Amino acid sequence: MFSFITQNWRGRPLVSYEAIINLIGSTTTTSGLRIKAKLNRRKYKTGLKVSNAELAKINIKPAKFHGDWNYKILPGMT
């Protein structure tokens, strides 16, 4: 959906959270998909580290084309 969002806000100033949320929320596709957007003002911890063991538990399936950039995260392990 990100490509449709960026097309929708192209050339418009992103001057406030309200403007951004409204532009994202007004995005649709020709097939009828719609996006809902809501501002989340919670604070999140930064600098958290993921161990190699934790990362190994994630079921990541690389795509054939640029699998280092394009991948699926699937439920469970295969």
Image (cartoon, rainbow, N blue to C red):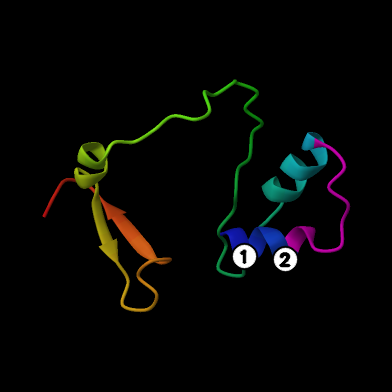
User: Mark 1 highlights which residue?
Assistant: 3
Label 2 residue SS: helix
6 vs 29, nearest the viewer: 6
Crowd rating for badge 1 (residues with CA inside 10 Å; few <14, some 14–19, many 20+): few
Query: Helix, strand, or loop for circle 1?
Result: helix
- Name the dominant secondary structure of the magenta segment: loop
Q: Is 31 positioned to the left or the right of 16 in the image?
A: left
In the rendered view of the protein, which quadrant contains the C terminus?
Answer: bottom left
Could you tell me which residue is drawn at 86 percent across and 63 percent down? 11
Q: Which quadrant of the view contains residue 69?
A: bottom left
Residue at the location (60% across, 49% down)? Answer: 35
Question: At which x and y percent is residue 76?
Answer: 17, 45
70 to the left or right of 54: right
Quadrant for residue 8, please give it.
bottom right
Q: CA distance from mark 1 to mark 2?
A: 6 Å
Kind of residue indicated by mark 2: Gln
Q: Is residue 56 above or below residue 71?
A: above
Q: Amino acid at mark 1?
A: Ser
Camera-nearest residue between 67 and 22: 67
- Decide which of 43, 17 is in the foreground and name it: 43
Question: Dot 2: within a 10 Å radius of its alpha carbon, few (fewer than 14), some, or many (20 or more) residues?
Answer: few
Q: Is residue 63 magenta?
A: no
Quick one: which residue is furthest to the bottom in this view?
65
Image location (x, y in percent) of residue 50: 34, 36
Where is residue 4? Give x, y as percent.
64, 64
The magenta stretch is 8-16
Q: Quadrant of residue 5?
A: bottom right
Q: Which residue is at the front of the view, 73 or 26?
A: 73
Could you tell me which residue is drawn at 55 percent across and 68 percent down? 31
Label 2 sits on residue: 7
Circles 1, 2 touching at the beta carbon (< 8 Å):
yes
Residue at (64% x, 34% y) in the render: 38
